[in-house]
Image (cartoon, grey):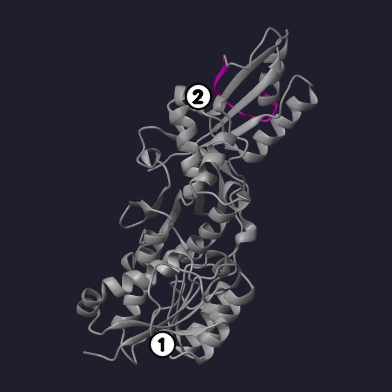
Amino acid sequence: MGEALRVGIAGLGTVGASVVRILAEKSAELTRQCGRTISVTAVSARDRNKDRGVSLEGIAWFDDPVELARKGDIDVLVELIGGEEGAAKASVKAALEAGRHVVTANKALLAAQGLSLAEIAEKKGVLLNYEAAVAGGIPVIKTMREALAGNAITRVFGILNGTCNYILTRMEQEGISFADCLADAQRLGYAEADPTFDIEGHDTAHKLSILTSLAFGTRIAPSAIYMEGISNITQADIRAAGELGYRIKLLGVAQKTDSGIEQRVHPTMVPTASVIAQVHGVTNAVAIETDILGELLLSGPGAGGNATASAVIGDIADIAKSRPGFQHGPVFGRPAKELAPYRKARMRAHAGGYFIRLTVHDRTGVFAAIAKRMAENDISLESIVQHATGEDSADRKTVILVTHETTEAAVRKAVEGMEKDKHLLDKPQVIRIERAA
C-alpha cells in the first residue's frame, strides 16, 4: 500500500462539499481501487463558520487559497473557486509551480489560461486534470485524451449547457414561453440570478474551446467562436420545428475543414429521430466523429454537486494510481509547446440548410420579393409556406422558409435585403439545420 495522497480543496461550495463527503464515504473502496488512501488534509473557503453539511474536523483551514497551494500539506490542489482570474488562477499556478498536481472544474480558467498552465504542468512533470470542466459527469476528456488514441477526430459537437437544454425542453413539452421557463430554472437553481453566461452561449463556448484543442491539437481560442444564445427562441419556432420534424437544441460544434477549424455555438434544429434530439432537461451529450471509430455519443448528467464531484474524484483517483517517475501525458493531448496556432475556417457551405421565420405584411408582392432576395444570393429553397400562428392577424402573417445547403453569408445577406424591402414587421429568425447523431 502506497503513501496516502493528500488533497487540498480550494472552494467549498456545493461541489467542494460533495467531494469532501464522497471521499469520506467511499474511502475504503477508493483505497482498494487506487492502492493507496486518499485524504483531504487542507481546505480553503471564504467563510470558516458556514455549515456545509460535512465534517472538516482534523482538516487544516487556510483563509487564502494561494497559501494552501504553496504551503499546505498536500500533493494535489482541487480548485473549485471559479473564474478565469483572481484566486483561481493564482492558486492553480502556485500549486503547479510548487510541483503539485491540480484538479479543476473551472472551464473559464482553462479557456483563458489553459495553454500557460499546461506549459507549467508539463515542465514540472505534474498532472493538470479537468474532467469536471466540460459536461459534468460525462468522461469526455478522458475519452478524448486516452481512449481515442490513434483516431483522427473530424468533428465534435454536443449539448454542453444543462440550463439551456432544460429551458428548450420545457418550452417544447409544456408550450410555455422562454421568459417563464427561465424564471422556473432560476427558482429551481438550474440558472443563476444573472443567466447571461448560460443563455447567451458563453458557458458552451468555453467548454467547446477546450474540446476543440483536444480534438485538433490547436491552441485554445474561445474568442474565435461564433456565438448565439437562445433568448430569441419563441414558441412559434418550437412549434414550426416540430411540424417540420425537428427539435431545437443549443449546440456547440467544432469541425475540421480544408481551410481551418470551425467553431460555433447557436440554436440548432436537429431531426427528432436523432439520438441527440432525445437528450432532455439538464442532461448533456457530446458526439465525437473519428476516422477509425466512426461516431461516438456520450450522454449523462452535465451539472450538479454529485455529477461534477464524480468527475473531480475520478481525476483525483487517476493521480492516486500514478507513481513517482511516471511520465504523465500532455494536458491537451499534445505537448503545450506543440499545439498549433488556431486557424479559423473560411465561411463555407452549411450542409444542413437553414430555417428562416419571417413576420410580414399581408399584402401582394411579399412572397415574390422574398423569393427574389433568395435567388439573388443563389439560395435554393426546399419550401416556402405561410405558417399560421396565434399572433397572426388580417395584415400580419408568418412565413417559414427552409433552404437547401448554402452559406451563412448568403443567408444573412438575403435577410438584410428583405429588411430593406420593408416587408418585415419583426426581426427575422434564422436557425441552422444540422445533421446529428
Q: Callout 2: few (<14), some (14-19), or many (20+) C-alpha neighbours within 10 Å?
A: some
In the shown orientation, is residue 391 left or right of residue 163? right
**Circle 1 residue:** 75
Which of these two is toward me, 22 or 89? Answer: 22
Helix, strand or loop at mark 2: helix
Magenta segment, which residues? 375-387
What amino acid is at disc 1? Asp
Q: Secondary structure at mark 1?
A: loop
Q: Tell me what residue is drawn at x 60 percent, y 63 percent.
A: 221
Residue 53 can be seen in this image:
yes
Residue located beneath label 2 in the image: 239
Residue 322 lies in the magenta stretch = no
Q: Of the residues shown, which amino acid type is indicated by label 2?
A: Arg
Number of labelled discs? 2
Q: Nearer the viewer, residue 84 or 378?
A: 84
For image coordinates 60% across by 54% down, the residue present is: 202
Q: Residue at x 76, y 27 (%)?
A: 419
Marked residue nearer the N-terminal end (1 or 2): 1
